[in-house]
Image (tube, rainbow, N blue to C red):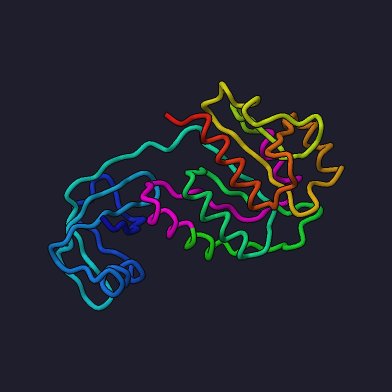
Amino acid sequence: MERFYAPDLLSTSETIELSPDESHHIIRVFRKHAGETVAIANGDGLMATATITGQTRKTVRCSIQSIEQISRPEPQLQIAISCIRPNRMDWAIEKLTELGVATIQPLICEHTSVRHFKIDHSRKIAVSAMKQSGIAWLPELREQISFSDWLAAEELQENTVRMLAHLDPSSQPVGQFCQHSTQKISVAIGPEGGFSAKEIAIADAANFRFAKLDNAILRAETAAIVAATQIKSLFLK
């Protein structure tokens, strides 16, 4: 069953009118007609089964048949990744959405070369990935922030396992740090060239754990996916 996105969907909704973009996909791409059934997600855990009841050139109206509240996957995982080239960031956001990451935080680090993040464009990438993979949750996409400001905010968070992806002899696999955690996990991924010595020092002072994702040096987008996959695999049911 094809899935579509309606952020206005509520647990009490009986009908829903889809946006022009989603309506275009239903009418022009999937060639759906009145009486056909579709799935609709709001990105916050609600998944509805609905019947198309009417359409115009730009809008589609649906009658809600059933609604299910789907729990957010545990643990709640935040990937904080240095801003990278747009096409690579798009790929990372797509895959992190598919993996059920709760939060994606773009970072500006000392070695970051790309210092802008197109959040509206990235939301469209995430919505498309959510629909394609059949999940019910969108990640929270945040505006870019400096690494030092992010660290300061993270220190205020409770019940969070904090890791810095860092290829170093002292680093340990992620499983060593989150075997017993079902709360929140944050992983910071650096840019090409890695984190600076200063950034590593302040992360260490903030009690971040140094995590080894692989024996090889990984691109930022690859490291983000590897970290999310390794952590998700620890909590599969």
Q: In which quadrant of the rendered view does residue 128 lie? A: bottom left
Q: Residue at x 64, y 50 (%)?
A: 222
Q: Residue at x 47, y 63 (%)?
A: 124
Specify the segment rendered in magenta: 126-155
Q: Is residue 26 left or right of residue 181?
A: left
Pick the quarter of the image with the C terminus.
top left
Q: In which quadrant of the rendered view does residue 33 lie? A: bottom left
Q: Position of residue 86 (x, y in %)?
A: 63, 65
For this orientation, the residue located farthest to the top is: 180
Q: Position of residue 143 (x, y in %)?
A: 61, 55
Q: Position of residue 186 (x, y in %)?
A: 62, 37
The correct choice, above or below, for 44 with respect to 33 in the image is above
| Closer-to-camera residue (54/223) | 223
Q: Is residue 140 left or right of residue 64?
A: right
Q: Position of residue 214 (x, y in %)?
A: 69, 39
Q: Decide whether residue 131 is among the magenta residues.
A: yes
Q: Residue at x 54, y 61 (%)?
A: 122
For this orientation, the residue located farthest to the right is: 197
